[in-house]
Image: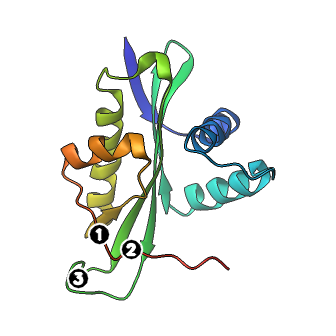
Amino acid sequence: MIAYRKLNEGDLDTFIRMRIAQLREEGAKEEIDLTPALKDYYRRHMSDGTFVSWLAIDGDRIIGTSGMSFVEKPPYFGCPSGKMGLLSSMFTDPAYRRRGIAKELLDRVIREAKEYGCGTVQITASDMGVKFYTAYGFVHNGNFMQYKL
């Protein structure tokens, strides 16, 4: 039986290992240790309420993760509140995929974004995730661009 609960500080080491595994699975090749920066980020933003994560648990093992960072931009017509959710850390252990776990985790963090007052949620989806997010109701924004500093 899969149980769901929010991420807490005691889960961070496992959560970060899973986040790094997810990034590698998506093709990240950089050879830097992200662990300290991730730990710092999650601690700060969990404590100020601008990051929330729900976990899927089987027994005492985390088998699925989700994450939602809350940011604020100047309001615009597509998001009059200016509050946005940035979805990340969506990962399910390969042995548990195609059982509805990711959808349940996504439902929970989407609810958190609504409660926070977000007008939109954005994600940079992996190739594998595009069908999942499209089926959920996400739409492509063809103008998304990024400039690396």
Residue at numbered disc 1: 141
Disc 2 crowd, CA 10 A, few/some/many (<14, 14-19, 20+): few
Q: In this view, does 80 lie above or below 144?
A: below
Name which residue type carries label 1: Asn
Task: Please say if the residues under marks 2 and 1 sit with CB atoms less than 8 Å apart.
Answer: yes
Name which residue type carries label 3: Pro
Q: Quadrant of the C terminus?
A: bottom right
- Earlier along the polypeptide chain: callout 2 or callout 3? 3
Q: Is residue 39 left or right of residue 6?
A: right
Secondary structure found at label 1: loop
Q: Nearer the viewer, residue 126 or 118?
A: 126
Disc 1 crowd, CA 10 A, few/some/many (<14, 14-19, 20+): few
How far apart are labels 2 and 1 at the CA level? 6 Å
Q: Is residue 19 above or below residue 124?
A: above
Residue at numbered disc 3: 80
Query: Residue 75 at x, y = what percent?
Result: 30, 87
Query: Residue 43 at x, y = what percent?
Result: 66, 54
Query: Residue 27 at x, y = what percent?
Result: 60, 45
Q: Is residue 93 left or right of residue 127?
A: right
Q: In this view, does 66 lie to the left or right of 44?
A: left
How far apart are labels 2 and 3 at the CA level? 19 Å
Q: Is residue 2 above or below residue 133?
A: above
Name which residue type carries label 2: Phe
Q: Which of 106 and 32 is in front in this view?
A: 32
- Earlier along the polypeptide chain: callout 3 or callout 1? 3
Residue at numbered disc 2: 144
Query: Residue 53 at x, y = what percent?
Result: 47, 45
